[in-house]
Image: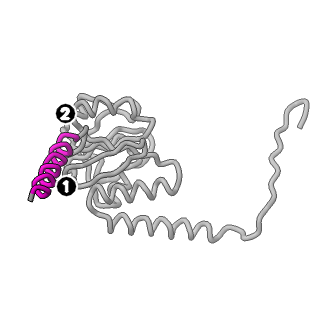
Amino acid sequence: MFLKKIACGLLCAAMLVAAGCGGVGTQTGGDKAYLQLTDAAGRQVSLAKKPERVVSLSPSYLSMIEAVGGTVVGRASSKVGKIPESMKSVPEVGMVYNINMEALVGLKPDLVLASKNQHDKFIPMLQSNKINVVEFDTQTFEDVKGTIKTLGDIYGTQDKAQKENELLDKQVAAVTGKLPKEKKRIVIMHATASAV
């Protein structure tokens, strides 16, 4: 009986400690978070519930968001890249490199999608306003597929994300399948006025 009381006391103490350890973007208490992930910047992000008001700071994410069935309530402006038709009327929060934080915070987002390195300077301001941020790094084909998978997890549309990645694989295979099978040896020569 004595051992049961000690065990019960230790369990209660452990629960109290765990409840007091929540950080920025994490849910405290006994309820399980909707999603926990590690973003491209190595930050642990915990979403207490499914995001309903998402803002994308990079226009290149918009087509991926649309592909997984997601929506945004705000987006960055850009002179390059194609904006999906369904997102052209979405409020803008400034240019990609010059985000208007007042406009962004005014949209009351529960999640901001940012580009690693490009938007690092905005992270402390967003966190101080208790806005969750997920940073992506889409430099390679595998990075793009990883971003699509994560977006599917965020929006709860994992099946659509998987189908989109399968489609991308087929499109790449269709192109690479047409490449010559034999390997070629290539020499690159740099010529100047005095030498080669």
Question: Residue 80: image x %, image y %?
Answer: 45, 42
Q: Residue at (43%, 56%) from the top-left corner?
A: 146
Boundaries of the magenta span: 2-21
187 relative to 17 in the view: left or right: right
SS class, disc 2: helix
Q: Residues within 10 Å of mark 1 (few under 14, many from 20)?
A: few
Question: Which residue matches tag 2?
Answer: 106
User: Relative to the observer, which residue lies in front, 2 or 154?
Assistant: 2
64 relative to 182 in the view: left or right: left
In the displayed orientation, state which residue is furthest to the front.
2
Quadrant where the C terminus is found in the figure: top right
Looking at the picture, which amino acid does disc 2 mark?
Gly
Question: Residue 6: image x %, image y %?
Answer: 14, 52
114 relative to 23 in the view: left or right: right
Disc nearer the start of the sequence (2/1): 1
**119 lies above or below 67:** above
Question: Which residue matches tag 1?
Answer: 32
Quadrant where the N terminus is found in the figure: bottom left
User: Is most of the magenta stretch helix, strand or loop?
Assistant: helix
Q: Residue at (50%, 70%) from the top-left corner?
A: 170
- Figure colour scheme: one colour
User: Relative to the observer, which residue lies in front, 24 or 194?
Assistant: 24
Disc on res. 174:
none
Looking at the picture, which amino acid does disc 1 mark?
Lys
Q: Report the label total.
A: 2
Q: Residue at (43%, 40%) from the top-left corner?
A: 116
Question: Residue 122: image x %, image y %?
Answer: 34, 31
User: Relative to the observer, which residue lies in front, 80 or 38?
Assistant: 38
Rendering quarter of residue 57: top left
Q: Residue at (25%, 46%) from the top-left corner?
A: 54
Pair 2/1: label in front: 1
Q: CA distance from mark 2 to mark 1?
A: 28 Å
